[in-house]
Image (cartoon, helix red, strand yellow):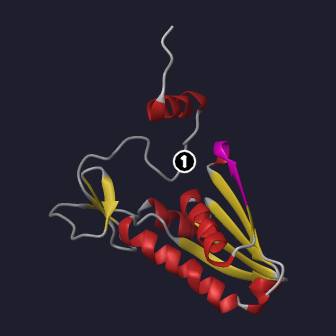
Amino acid sequence: MRRERGPYRYRRLQVLEGYGNDAYRAARKPAGAIQCTRCGAVFHKGRWSWRAAPPGAKKQRCPACRRIDERFPAGYVRLSGEFFEARRDEVLARVRHCETQEKAEHPLERIIAVENDGGGALVTTTSGHLARLVGHALKSAFGGRLSITYNRQDNLARVRWQRASA
């Protein structure tokens, strides 16, 4: 029996086990171009991008705008600790910077909301990828503890970042 290797094996296992089922992404790539009615992103030749819509593009909301409108995140980033409280603006600026960089190349990677609560903040994102990226950026810039958990069946990532001392 031949043993599979590399990314194809991983992707095949995802499909067989039902991973990657996201209700906000189409099961098949749509034929033709689509322009988002809310943000203006364009789906053309198999990918979403920031560009001018070709003539005859259909109008509908992109998966990210649908998630934002329905407030149904795919990623949660919990920020806490004394360091966060002391340097809240600096940490949140870093979070926004990560979103800006990622969104420039990938229009579906966005922050839904930043909610302050007792002793920290909760950042919700349109993808688990952006949540993970934000967590690693905060760990790299400020240190602290980082934990990431994935729920593949629900297409959900939970990231916790905290740093005790300022």
Q: Is residue 150 magenta?
A: yes
Residue 136, image x and y in percent? Answer: 61, 66
Question: Is 2 left, or right, of 86 in this rendering?
Answer: left
On the image, which quarter does residue 62 sit in?
bottom left
Q: Residue furthest left?
A: 55
Q: Position of residue 27 (x, y in %)?
A: 44, 41
Q: How many marks?
A: 1
Q: Is residue 22 left or right of residue 27?
A: right
Q: Answer above or below: position of 138 versus 109.
A: below
Say what amino acid the circle numbered 1 marks: Asp
* The C terminus sits in image quarter: bottom right
Instruction: Say which of 16 and 67 sits in front.
Output: 16
Q: Main SS of the magenta segment?
A: strand
Q: Position of residue 115 (x, y in %)?
A: 70, 80
Residue 166 vs 25, above or below: the answer is: below
- Is residue 101 a member of the stretch shown in magenta? no
Q: Secondary structure at mark 1?
A: loop
Residue 15, percent from left and from top:
52, 32
**Highlighted range, magenta:** 147-153
Residue extending farthest top: 1
* In the displayed structure image, the side of residue 146 where residue 137 appears, left or right: left
Residue 67 vertical position relative to residue 23 in the rendered view, above or below? below
Query: Could you tell me if residue 71 is visible in this image?
Result: no
Q: Residue at x 17, y 63 (%)?
A: 54
Name the residue located 47 percent from the left edge and 32 percent from the top edge: 6
Q: Which residue corresponds to mark 1?
A: 22
- Local packing at callout 1 (Cα closer than 10 Å; few below 14, some 14-19, many 20+) is some
Residue at (64% x, 74% y) in the render: 138
Residue 17 visible somewhere in the drawing = yes
Q: Who's the residue at 58% across and 38% down the image?
A: 19
